[in-house]
Image (spheres, rainbow, N blue to C red):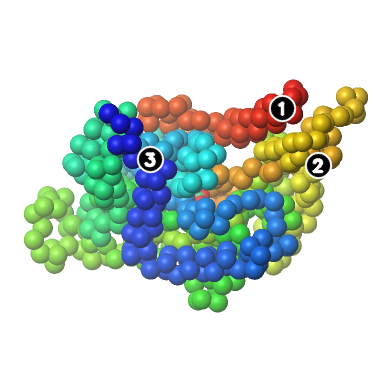
Amino acid sequence: ASHSMYADKDDLRTQFAAAMSAMYRAEVPLYGDLIEIVRNINTNVKDVTGSIKPHLNSGIHASIERLTQERHGAIRLGTPYELRTVKRIFEALGMHPIGYYDLSIAGLPMHATCFRPLTVSSLECNPFRIFTTLLRPELLSSEKTRQLALQLLERRSIFSEQLLRTLDQIDEQGSRLKEDQTEVFIHEALKTFQWQPVAAATFDEYQTLKAEHPILADIACFQSAHINHLTPRTLDIVAVQDAMKKAGMAAKEQIEGPPVRLCPILLRQTSFLALEEAVQFRRDENQSLDEIESRDALVKASHKARFGEIEQRGAAVTPKGRKLYDKLLYESKAKAKDTAGEEADALAAEAFKAYPDTWDELRQQNLIYCEFKVKEPTTTPSFDVQDGSVLEQLISKGIVEAVPITYEDFLPLSAAGIFQSNLQSSNSSSLATSYQPAEDLGGLEKAMGAEILDLNSWYMSVQQRSLEEVGVRLGLMLE
Ligand code: OOG
Ligand code: NI
């Protein structure tokens, strides 16, 4: 068989992401407005020559093509079966599990990973990523609620028969799609993540779970694993935040993540608040969804889960850089406990003065990851072996360029979670008091039936590969 009968995964992912964006735009029109704002600001960040205005020239390179289509979404799953099946969908799109996020430390009975492309070239084509959480029923304090949630999840099927058949075919083809399977696949896979206005639960069941934790009701009561947000990336989150407020959106007061810096690191995010959406619930559990002829048989109510988010990405930090980030953020949160708005921002900026803010310092102190590139291949490098790092000499001589690697992942607990739990002010009521929240990477891998790639190993390998290439081109051994 000729190779070209199979669809290219990067193309497929781009198509899928665009289709999901169109779907979400139809479901949540405010998302469409947000996309327009972000697009305008990203375009204006570049001046007429196409280069980024100096004050935003962050060293974090992203092509405008990548930026315009870049999104991340988030879904919340209930069972290992759902996770394993979703993994098969994403694998066909060239997205693989990387990173482990323990949300129990924020009082949520869930843990998560992210599905995204793993090669630098696929990320450049389309970095579409989905933050995927799985319920941890063992962390629920009430046996009654646990049983109810598990029953509801057992009963529902978020995958269409057609999708499951197509997934079997894809598996037989080595996780690849034939060109003529792509349309059906995208259509059927999208249904899994679509908003379903008729719940799978009765109104009573919904309220029982909601009383335990709103997120539990969101996970277990619906017929699909609806995406709860789809986030565009901006080069200037402060400008977008202002524009959101001007447009009358209920934007969050504070931008989460590190404060404004000359050299952005990790991730800054903000959002508009969750919308109240109409949902219909069955009156009792004997009323099967197929039997319902008249919508009057349903209880009309509403559900709040889906919101709009934007983000600005900075450099990926090393474990040492992350430790310093966590420490300073914790300090500034503790100090800013009773403040808000500009006052809180000022306290964060003050605390973060201890975080180096030039690319040279960040790199030399091993706080960030970089990709190294040969700038002047014709120069014969000469250096003093006695004089510190060969690599730093090559950089200062202008032979090698160090480009900070963009942080491609998440910080779900960057602000809210960690400190909420540390300061004991959260509603962690849904967690069993006898159960010490603890991460369970092995448990998530077992549920998914696959290994999760370690974040730091990934950034390290990107950096290392670039060094090897520089070494080969200059005929040097670098480490
Ligand atoms: C978790 C979403 C996490 C982010 O940007 O940190 C996330 C959830 O609410 O399901 O998307
Ligand atoms: Ni998000």
Identify the mark nearer the N-term, 3 or 1: 3
Q: Residue at x 18, y 41 (%)?
A: 161
Is residue 209 visible from the viewing direction of this image? no
Q: Position of residue 413 (x, y in %)?
A: 56, 47
Q: Which residue is mark 1?
A: 471
Q: Residue at x 53, y 46 (%)?
A: 124
Q: Residue at x 84, y 34 (%)?
A: 393
Identify the mark nearer the N-term, 2 or 1: 2
- Mark 3 closeness class: few <14, some 14–19, many ≥20 residues within 10 Å: some
- Mark 1 closeness class: few <14, some 14–19, many ≥20 residues within 10 Å: some
297 or 402, nearer to the observer: 402
Is 77 positioned to the left or the right of 408 in the image?
left
Q: How far is mark 3 from mark 2, CA to CA?
A: 38 Å
Q: Amino acid at mark 1?
A: Gly
Q: Position of residue 228 (x, y in %)?
A: 40, 55
Is 168 positioned to the left or the right of 260 in the image?
left
Is 350 positioned to the left or the right of 56 in the image?
right
Q: Amino acid at mark 2?
A: Gly
The image quadrant that residue 303 belongs to is bottom left
Q: How far is mark 2 from mark 1, CA to CA?
A: 15 Å
Q: Which residue is mark 2?
A: 398
The image quadrant that residue 147 belongs to is top left
378 or 82, nearer to the observer: 378
Q: Amino acid at mark 3?
A: Asp
Vertical side of 89 occupied by 228: above or below: below
Is residue 285 visible from the viewing direction of this image? yes
Identify the mark nearer the N-term, 3 or 2: 3
Q: Which residue is mark 3?
A: 8
